[in-house]
Image: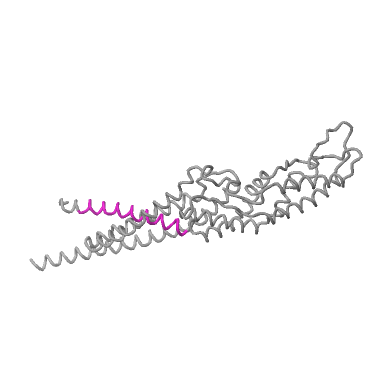
Amino acid sequence: MRPMKVWRVITLCLWGIFLTGFIVVSSFYFLLNFSILNQAKMKQALAANNFYQSLRDEQIIPALIAKTSITPTEAGVLPRKDITAALKQVFPAARVETMSNSVIDVIYQWLDKKRPDMSFTIDLSQEKQQLINVLSTTIDQNAEKLPDCESGQDVADDPTLLTCLPPFVQASDVATAAKEEMKRVIDQTEASLTNEDVALTNRTIGDIRNVPDYLSYLWTLNLITLPLAALSTLYLILRRKGGGLIVVGGALAITGILAIIGYAVTQSRLLYWPGATFDTLLTAARSLVRPMLLLFGGIGIGVGVLLIALGIVWVYQRRKHLKRKALAND
């Protein structure tokens, strides 16, 4: 092979490497924008994967219990299971979804660097009164079920912790005292839910706080790689003819293959976080990313193979034309 041809092949390979890099970076940017960074699609995916129910049971209810001074027990007039049941009644899935959507709006504004942090405050004054009403009914029912205290049995000073009826005390008296104590404690509790209650602060999220910067870098990089990919493609086709078309097709095909590999890899979870909330969040994200990977892979491989085939035909026809021209000159 002549030195000029060797140099031509080497330069085409280098062009192919650079073009593949440009296309991969831009494809990754558009993949994120069409999937998990699409706020409307993400909300739909979360709802389809029962994210809001998991969020309520694992994050919101424990956070609300922690905000109050109520000490949940396993028995008595106000056991843990009844407090949890009351909170689930006060915070149905529809209400949690409405609350969560407002938080998601804040998070996406933070990701877009439109706000410095993920701070939010959700007013719960209406739910606070509903909770008092539901727990009052629960206390009345549980007080009627209390057995009489046995001789020598310890009796709690807090009426909400009583597990039996002391001597000469009526169930109605216990219920009244427990409801007054419960109402006093809840009235003292701030009727709001903030980002600090669910550990969404720059101090608690660790390296995740840098994600907006990473997305900003990716956006800037895409502004560079996208026009470079377009200019490189034009140069290769206009100056390198069929060989350039083969390089462009190869770059697209490689990008498509990488997308298909990503589709196969994401079939199983790559991250394992404890709890159903994070598991559901990852499942929702995967449900958005994987179809886009398959789409990008199919387009990349399909268009790439087509361009390679056209490039090969172009090179063959060009060589055939040059050979005819050389024979005619002879």
In the figure, 245 relative to 9: above or below?
A: below
Which picture quadrant has residue 43? Answer: bottom right
203 to 87, vertically: above or below = above
Q: Residue at x 31, y 58 (%)?
A: 229
What residue do we see at 31% from left, 61% from top? 230
25 with respect to 163 (left or right): left
| Location of residue 19 in the rendering, given as x and y in whole percent from the top left corner | 30, 55
Image: magenta residue range: 8-34
Instruction: State the residue lying farthest toward the left.
Output: 330
Q: Is residue 12 magenta?
A: yes
**Chief secondary structure of the magenta portion:** helix
Name the one closer to the observer, 100 or 136. Answer: 136
Q: Nearer the viewer, residue 198 or 302?
A: 198
Question: x, y percentage for residue 250?
Answer: 32, 56
Please name the residue shown 71% across and 42% down the image.
69
Answer with the quarter of the image where residue 74 lies: top right
- Which residue occupies the extreme top position in the image? 152
Tally the marks.
0
Where is residue 112 shown, x and y percent of the image?
46, 55
Q: Does the magenta segment cover residue 123?
A: no
Depth check, front residue: 22 or 129: 129
**Where is residue 281 drawn, in percent x and y?**
56, 51
Q: Is residue 4 left or right of residue 28?
A: left
Camera-side residue: 219 or 131? 131
The colour scheme used here is one colour
